[in-house]
């Protein structure tokens, strides 16, 4: 007993072991192991870099600032997860699909779950600022058969690279956001404006820290989509402009070759515009796997 008590005394050598031992009776074995592993890595980092108390307080202050910067319009914790590649890695592990299916990417920090439903053919650009864009969408299964009544949620940055919830005083509410439903042929279309590439927000603690460390904080121009249909796995993805010069350094690690498309020159109502035609390929939900 004395040997066990001595072995479990907290010290630099045994700190991680002492912490992990307390999870031996945990209710959720996998959760316990995940927390214990995370703490072990933290302890290892502390032992490797040996921060002073003041340096460690700065780490705590950073995490505190991340929490304070998060609200109903902005999720700084999601931004942190996205920028360190954690969101992309979790998505990659959990959404493996056949090669022909549309791959998932991260949702990003500017998603809103209250996008207004709009009629096919309408515009999501409420201020009309920017180069016109016509978007055509088809949703189908792996056999090429159309999926009717699928929900297609879309959102994007404006021509200056800002999302509506970044500029609540400058853009109309729900600007460049919308929820559409496919027709019996699995199709819908809408109008928008060409999005711009943009810098990841650097006005918060996450952006400031990574910018100071020299980390690239650019995102190529893109359109976001969430596609839902009964009996199919939900698609959360991006579509990227093939002409954007920052495709190779996406800060959120979302670029895939099959998600890069050309926005073609077009004419809309006598105006110079762009047009893009997109196909989303859905996979049927497997038994025991959530959609």
Image (spheres, rainbow, N blue to C red):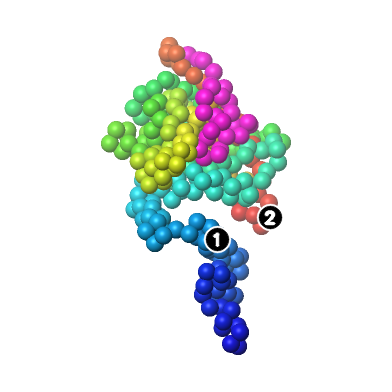
Graded by Cα atoms within 10 Å as few (under 14), some (14 to 19) or many (20 or more), the crowding at tag 1 reads some
Instruction: Check residue 83 in the rendering and tell me which mark sits there, or answer none.
Output: none
Of the pair 81 and 214, the residue shown nearer to us? 214
Q: Which residue is drawn at 51% across and 15% down?
A: 265
Identity of the residue drawn at 55% across and 61% down: 44
Decide: is 242 above or below 100. Answer: above
The residue mark sitting in front, 2 or 1, is 1
- 51 is higher (above) or lower (below) than 189: below
Work out how far the residue at label 2 is from the one at label 1, CA to CA, in angstroms.
40 Å
Q: How many marks?
A: 2
Left of 13 or right of it: where is 192? left
Give the residues drawn in magenta, as a range: 242-267
Out of 194 and 65, give the one closest to the viewer: 65
Residue assigned mark 1: 44
Is there any visible trace of residue 111 in the rendered image?
A: no
Residue corresponding to mark 2: 287
Q: What element carries label 1?
A: helix
The image shows residue 183 at horizontal and vertical percentages of 56, 33
- Which residue is found at the position 47% from the left and 14% from the top? 267
């Amino acid at each position: 007993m004395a040997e066990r008590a001595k072995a479990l005394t907290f010290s630099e050598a045994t700190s991680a072991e002492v912490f992990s031992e307390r999870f031996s009776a945990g209710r959720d074995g996998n959760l316990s192991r995940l927390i214990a592993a995370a703490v072990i890595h933290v302890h290892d980092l502390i032992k490797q870099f040996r921060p002073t108390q003041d340096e460690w307080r700065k780490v705590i202050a950073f995490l505190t600032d991340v929490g304070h910067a998060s609200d109903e319009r902005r999720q700084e914790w999601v931004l942190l997860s996205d920028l360190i590649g954690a969101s992309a890695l979790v998505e990659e592990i959990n959404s493996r699909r056949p090669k022909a299916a549309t791959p998932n990417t991260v949702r990003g920090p500017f998603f809103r779950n209250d996008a207004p439903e709009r009629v096919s053919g309408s515009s999501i650009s409420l201020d009309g600022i920017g180069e016109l864009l016509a978007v055509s969408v088809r949703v189908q299964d792996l056999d090429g058969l159309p999926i009717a009544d699928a929900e297609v949620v879309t959102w994007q940055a404006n021509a200056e690279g800002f999302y509506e919830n970044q500029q609540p005083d400058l853009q109309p509410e729900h600007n460049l956001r919308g929820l559409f439903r496919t027709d019996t042929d699995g199709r819908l279309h809408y109008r928008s404006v060409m999005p711009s590439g943009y810098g990841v927000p650097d006005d918060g603690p996450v952006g400031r820290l990574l910018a100071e460390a020299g980390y690239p904080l650019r995102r190529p121009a893109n359109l976001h989509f969430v596609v839902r249909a009964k009996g199919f796995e939900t698609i959360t993805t991006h579509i990227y402009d093939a002409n954007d010069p920052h495709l190779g350094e996406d800060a959120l690690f979302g670029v895939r070759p099959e998600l890069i498309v050309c926005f073609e020159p077009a004419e809309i109502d006598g105006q110079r515009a762009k047009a893009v035609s997109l196909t989303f390929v859905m996979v049927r939900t497997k038994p025991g796997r959530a959609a």
